[in-house]
Image (cartoon, coloured by chain):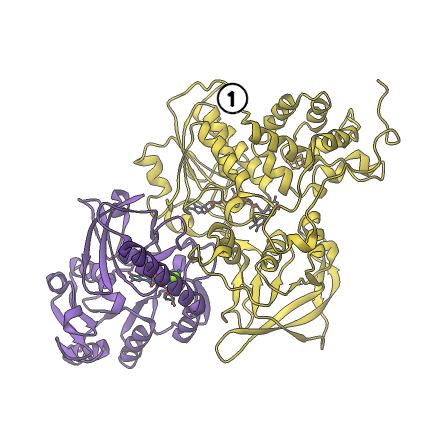
Chain colours: A purple, B yellow
Amino acid sequence: GFPIVARTDFSRTTFLLEVEHPQMARAARPGQFVIVMLDDHGERIPLTIADFDREKGTITLVIQAVGKSSREMQSRCQVGGALFGLVGPMGIPSEVSDAKKVICVGGGLGVAPIFPQARAFKEAGAHVIGVVGFRSANLVFWEEKFRSVCDEFIICTDDGSAGIKGLVTQGIEQAIAEHGDIDEVVAIGPPIMMRACAEATRPHKIKTMVSLNPIMVDGTGMCGGCRVRVGGKVKFACVDGPDFDGHEVDFDDLMARLQRYRPQEAEAMEQWLENCRRLQVEEVR
Amino acid sequence: MARKTIRSIPQERAFMPVLDAQERATNFEEVSLGFDEANALVECERCLICPEPACIPGCPVEIDIPGFISKMLKKDYHGAWDTLTDSTFLPAVCGRVCPQEDQCEGVCAVAVSGGLEPVAIGRLERWLGDMAIEKGWKNESHIEPNEYRIGIVGSGPASMACAADLAKAGCKVTVFEALHAPGGVLRYGIPEFRLPNSVVDAEIGNLEKLGVEIRCNTLVGRLFTVEQMLDEMGYDAVFIGTGAGYPSFMDIPGENFNGVLSANELLTRCNLMQAGKFPNFDTPLEIGRKVAVIGAGNTAMDAMRVSKRLGAEEVTCVYRRTEAECPARLEELHHAMEEGINFQWLTAPVEILGDSNKNVRAIRCQRMELGEPDDSGRRRPVPIPGSEFEFEADTVVYAIGTAPNPILGQTSDIKLNKWGYIDTDETLATSLAGVYAGGDIVTGAATVILAMGAGRRAAASIRDYLGIRD
Ligand SMILES: Cc1cc2nc3c(=O)[nH]c(=O)nc-3n(C[C@H](O)[C@H](O)[C@H](O)COP(=O)(O)OP(=O)(O)OC[C@H]3O[C@@H](n4cnc5c(N)ncnc54)[C@H](O)[C@@H]3O)c2cc1C
Ligand SMILES: Cc1cc2nc3c(=O)[nH]c(=O)nc-3n(C[C@H](O)[C@H](O)[C@H](O)COP(=O)(O)OP(=O)(O)OC[C@H]3O[C@@H](n4cnc5c(N)ncnc54)[C@H](O)[C@@H]3O)c2cc1C
Ligand code: SF4
Ligand code: SF4
Ligand code: FES
Ligand SMILES: [Mg+2]
């Protein structure tokens, strides 16, 4: 297995795992992802490499517990334990262009994965504006980490409990209004957010890169399950992406395809919760 | 002993039991049960032990077929298996999955000049292979280690065969596999009812007994490059056997509706990820009531028969040529027919239709007729105007072929041909010194035995390159 060496819980649903894999820490580039299996009955789930530490030989994953596999990881992955499967880095690394001024946008499960890109742009000498979105102040994480690589940093919360009240698109609009010379926007988050970001930048003709998260199995180009439509053409996100030009992506197609296994996912969740309840009852006895 | 003649041999093939078609179509048990000893010996009697056997050149790895059959007749089964394994590393696999009717059995004298069913060479080979697994036979008494380290990319039949030969030659061999389990298509593609995982596990176990180290969860090209293997990681030579797993679609309207998937996705979910046991295994797979599979090769047959076993009521094969051109193994085609698959020959899809939730609801096809022969000599199917029709389907599976996996091309300077396959010379050397390639990634999708043969040829070339002598 692959040893888990650190864990942090950011909120009731979001947690960080640091996993030992020196070879991967050396190879990883911003924008790449891994595929994880919790155990030999598990499914293969893709997760973005949110950070890597070449000296320590670790990679960092930030996971939102949304369904059976991610919730089971939340309850079972502890320091000292190990992951059954971990393969990567996968996908084509993000192109860190020579843009002078960029906005890096992260929302929901995209907040962590945008970090290595913001850092890479900073290291390449760009003026980096970070825009991150959370539901409310108590869910905010990595603020200091972001501030250390961003020249400007805008937090947006749905309820206004931290930063500006509103969606990340408001943060983008604010930044565009203040700077007439944004070269590029990079956005990672739920498809609906990435689409909104692409629509916000389209009238300004600002290049906008998004990182797509379709359902994957192997992540090696073998199953075609991750296919997305970009510019009218079919692409496999795991080997042709995951980054694509947001103005070209067919987000409706992506969102519909992400629904593919909803009934089974609900069933898996149901059964897992039921098993958890049963175990608790037994423990009490 | 008088020479055998066509008239003196058993006229009928020896009996090999198969599971009942109705019953087996609901489970994943192996369909063909194999010979027992008595029947295997009867089948051996049918071989004429030809002085100039046509069957040997008919086999891509030139197994000495009359040689192993003669030993079987003397009940020297271990000796027979040794003869087999002089040429093949995977007898229990190839005996099951080779398209024998196009290879060894297709040219067997018993059929060609005698007009009878050919000697069941594949079944005999399987019987010996299974016996070897059961008894734990091995034929490498002593390996003299040398100082060479070989890195192998992928763990399909090409890689397995190459690894075995180089390990026997004394090299320290490491196999890198991207998935979490080794075996390539033998693991994720060909289903349990045709090739049980226990057989694949046994063959992999034999590799490990030869001292080969297998490292799964390793995506070469991304975790490290082929160039790094030679320059930094200390491998003296590299073999690439990454297969041609990139599934093709047709670019007709409706291909992205939910319910449209590649055969590779269906088979991977089912075979590698055990989706049939959902929710006890976490990977889901939804097979509708009515499944349409496009294509008629082995992959299509497997996809159809798996769909049936996962509960589909109606499974239809859509193929633009006729049964005569169907590229699947004959046995699989027959088994699929027995299991109640519908075949729509001379039919091609033109559009996939969806409902308001973007789920598939039907497929629109057109009828074809055979026109002039094309470059391959096969008559080209041409659409019949006005013949379009629709039928209901909630799952549409593409099994129309694959393209080369792009990752190594993206990450290394290795020379590819214009279709994206790795370019090699006749020794299977690539454009990078010390790097060899073989199997589907060189030839395009082919067969297990051809991949295995290529792996062995590359192993011989690598030995020459490193100057390793017997
Ligand atoms: C390239 C990529 C990077 C990702 N990075 C992260 C990350 O850094 N952090 C994070 O929390 N999540 C990330 N995800 C999403 C994550 O993979 C899914 O949330 C996870 O697979 C859900 O599994 P589940 O069993 O917990 O939930 P389920 O209830 O099974 O699924 C919830 C939803 O997640 C999606 N999903 C389900 N299975 C898969 C799958 N095999 N592949 C992709 N999506 C799936 C579906 O839309 C589904 O409706 C990423 C996805 C991709 C493709
Ligand atoms: C469903 C199906 C049924 C078939 N039925 C038959 C049959 O009945 N008879 C027959 O003779 N042939 C059959 N074939 C064809 C046969 O299986 C293939 O020709 C054969 O497996 C090719 O072997 P290979 O070693 O070249 O590659 P594969 O078996 O494709 O193995 C390649 C391996 O390399 C791994 N890999 C790829 N890229 C990387 C990378 N970058 N790093 C690490 N690992 C990597 C893959 O994950 C895979 O495990 C069938 C094929 C399929 C798909
Ligand atoms: S390996 Fe295949 S072709 Fe060769 S003898 Fe065996 S079954 Fe026939
Ligand atoms: S051609 Fe047929 S009969 Fe002749 S040796 Fe080969 S298997 Fe036997
Ligand atoms: S996940 Fe299978 S091809 Fe991309
Ligand atoms: Mg899930």
User: A50 or A266, which lies in front?
Assistant: A266
**Image quadrant in which the C terminus of chain A is located:** bottom left
**Hey, which quadrant is residue B69 in on the image?**
top right
Q: Is residue B271 left or right of residue B56?
A: left
Residue A98 seen: no
Residue B353 drawn at (x, y percent): 57, 75
The answer to whether residue B428 is above or below residue B3 is: below
The answer to whether residue A43 is above or below residue B97 is: below
- Indicate the amino acid at tag 1: Glu
Ligand 3 position by quadrant: top right
Q: Could you tell me which chain the residue with mark 1 belongs to?
A: B
For image coordinates 48% across by 52% down, the residue present is: B274
**Hey, which quadrant is residue A277 in on the image?**
bottom left
The answer to whether residue B184 is above or below residue B235 is: below
Q: Is residue B378 left or right of residue A231?
A: right
**Hey, which quadrant is residue B315 in on the image?**
bottom right
Residue B448 drawn at (x, y percent): 58, 41
Residue B138 drawn at (x, y percent): 53, 24
For image coordinates 27% across by 77% down, the residue present is: A201
For image coordinates 62% across by 51% down, the residue present is: B298
The secondary element bearing badge 1 is classed as loop
Residue hosting label 1: B140
Residue B92 drawn at (x, y percent): 60, 36
Q: Is residue B346 left or right of residue B146?
A: right
Q: Is residue A84 left or right of residue B163?
A: left
**Image quadrant in which the N terminus of chain A is located:** top left
For image coordinates 24% across by 57% down, the residue present is: A50
Residue B338 seen: yes
* Crowd band around label 1 with a 10 angstrom C-alpha radius: few (<14), some (14–19), many (20+): few
Q: Is mark 1 within 8 Å of ligand 3?
A: no
The answer to whether residue B111 is above or below residue A240 is: above
User: A76 or A82, which lies in front?
Assistant: A76
